[in-house]
Amino acid sequence: MLTVDKANIQLGSLTLARDMSFDLKPGQITAILGPNGTGKSTLLKTLFGEIKLDSGEIAYCGHRLSYQSLAQWRHQFGYMPQDINLDVNLTVIEVILLGRLDALSLRVDDQTLNQVLHILDNIGIAHLANRSVNTLSGGQCQMVLFAQALMRDPAIMMLDEPVSALDLHHQHVLLEHLVCQTREKQCITLMVLHDLNLAAQYADNLLVLKQGDLVACGHPKQILTSELVEEIYNVEAQVITDDTGVPFVRTLRSKKAA
């Protein structure tokens, strides 16, 4: 279990986390929701050790985050940041292999190469294997970075807006594969999403942030309400339940325009 206990994060005069506590369990996907600038990406960077806590504690399986041994802490993560520049003269296969940089030798063995090809095939981009990444579209690069994170076979998967550049088909391909990876490997998965309906469909739990506060935490069926959407996003909305029992959010208008 990954535990965040009374975390406080302050950047200058801006409070990005205020006395924040929650647990993330193996085999479950948690989606972070909230308006722009509310600290969603900052929370991921804090868990990864890029941003220091002002106070509080982060621990995984009883081991506390220590800034003196970050390499050891980060070894268990597959982290896909929001913005990565892939303007490099490397093939897709080479970029994905970088996910195993700590275990690579001068010669890539057949087992490792087959693992890369298997991942590419599973997420539907095997045809890109020998393409240079600087010739790919934004959505294709996003799928390559997802494959790189999978290549680490991580205990903790963290993805910052992993479907922002993807078309509808590839959004579902990525998220369906993420569900399979999380269940089969019993890893902890945490992702930032802006699409409330994708979050409701694919996440086991939601963390809803606003102005540095964790205002709601729980299963989408329990916490995703029209009142919550109005409070967080300042819009009028209807939340209905589809035939499978999943909440569906229909936004109507900005409250300011009403």
Image: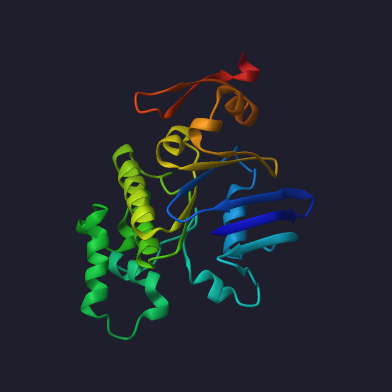
What percent of the width, then of the height, locates residue 192? 51, 46
Position of residue 159 in the picture relative to residue 148 (left or right): right
Image quadrant for the C terminus?
A: top right
* Closer to the camera in the image, 228 or 87: 228
Residue under the image location 28 percent in, 67 percent down? 93
Q: Is residue 83 visible?
A: yes
Residue under the image location 65 percent in, 19 percent down? 256
- Snapshot quadrant of residue 7: bottom right
Position of residue 91 in the picture relative to residue 12 (left or right): left
* Closer to the camera in the image, 23 or 230: 23
- Snapshot quadrant of residue 209: top right
What percent of the width, then of the height, locates residue 160? 50, 51
What percent of the width, then of the height, locates residue 34? 59, 38
Query: How many numbered badges does the structure rendering display?
Result: 0
- Snapshot quadrant of residue 244: top left
Residue under the image location 35 percent in, 67 percent down? 95
What percent of the width, then of the height, locates residue 60? 56, 64
* Closer to the camera in the image, 7 or 82: 7
Q: Is residue 129 visible?
A: no
Q: Is residue 151 above or below residue 72?
A: above
Q: How is the image coloured?
A: rainbow
Residue under the image location 50 percent in, 35 percent down? 220
Q: Is residue 237 above or below residue 78?
A: above
Position of residue 208 in the picture relative to residue 173 (left or right): right
